[in-house]
Amino acid sequence: MKIFERKGHAVIWGDATEALRQHVPDNSVDLIFADPPYNIGKDFNGNKDRWQSEEEYLKWCYEWLDLCVAKLKPNGSLYIMAATQNMPYFDLYLRKRLHILSRIVWAYDSSGVQARKYFGSLYEPILFCVKDKEGYTFNAEDILVEARTGATRKLIDYRKPVPSMYNTKKVPGNVWNIPRVRYRMPEYENHPTQKPVALLERVIRASSNPADIVLDPFSGTFTTSYVAKRLGRRSVGIEIEEEYVKIGLRRLEIQDTYSGEVLRRPAKSYERQVSLAQQQFALFEEKERWNTSSRR
């Protein structure tokens, strides 16, 4: 296990349960966002996310869930993602340990066919839990969205003492329509289950304050830590795959190099094509300039 730190941000390269036990004190974290492997066979840099049985997978999940609960401050918040088929187990397990305030649906569209013999999945569930339902952080004013009903239609709310138009802004409901990360998006990294910056911005703005500690035990592309840094929070990101650790070191600007390798985002295929075309055009211009000068 190895720890990289700089200016309030830590990247821990190691197993999530061991890192939580050894390097994160109890009652020390303000916000945890956990997006674990879903046990559906995704390929994470050559390692398949598949356990021998559902029972083994859930046993592992309950282990790190208990650790997450222990690491939260008394006024802390926990957001958990899971596969749709597994979330009921998480829900039943956590409701005995925390207060589940919201069951959120992250909904998105898909350009491809999801299924042909049943209804394909176009959402992922998120649980929003707190230790103390009477005392937790929720910055409603920081996450307001447009109210598309009464305010847009300029309807009057006659229930108020002085009738007036409906508010133009509101706190989001529990269905979040946020696009998935696509290859051509600037935020895209080489990871099969990258979560959008917009999703993490809503979570972190709502459930933490500047200088708070935000923890992600399955960091992947380190979007949680990246957004936390951008919003003035501190962060701890844990990741077991070395290739993804390098993404975190780069995105958090903790290191410029790693074992002699310069850390930079790999060029995408269409960017390489543009670069090649630019080089060819530059060579063509140079040749034309040379021919013109020769004729003189």
Image: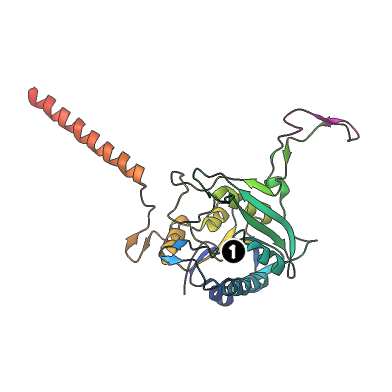
Locate the C terminus by quadrant.
top left
Q: Quadrant of residue 166?
A: top right
User: Is there any visible trace of residue 205 in the rendered image?
Assistant: no
Question: In the drawing, does residue 187 fall left or right of residue 93?
Answer: left
User: Is there any visible trace of residue 4 in the rendered image?
Assistant: yes
Viewer-side residue, 191 vs 55: 55
Range of magenta residues = 148-164
**Crowdedness near tag 1: few (<14), some (14–19) or many (≥20) residues, C-alpha within 10 Å:** many
Viewer-side residue, 101 vs 281: 101
Viewer-side residue, 278 vs 193: 193
Q: Quadrant of residue 145?
A: top right
Q: Quadrant of residue 23?
A: bottom right
Instruction: Residue 184 in the image: state x and y as whole percent.
Output: 43, 43
Confirm whether the magenta stretch covers residue 155: yes
Point 67% across, 59% down: residue: 127
Instruction: Residue 183 in the image: state x and y as whole percent.
Output: 44, 47
Residue farthest along the top direction in this orientation: 296
What is the chief secondary structure element of the magenta stretch?
loop
Point 43% across, 67% down: residue: 47
Confirm whether the magenta stretch covers residue 78: no
Query: SS of the residue at dot 1?
Result: strand
Residue farthest along the front direction in this orientation: 117
Q: Is residue 182 above or below residue 263?
A: above
| Disc 1 target residue | 215
Point 52% across, 73% down: residue: 52
Point 67% across, 47% down: residue: 175
Label 1 is placed on what type of residue? Leu
Question: In the drawing, does residue 290 fall left or right of residue 152?
Answer: left
Q: How many numbered discs?
A: 1
Residue farthest along the right direction in this orientation: 161
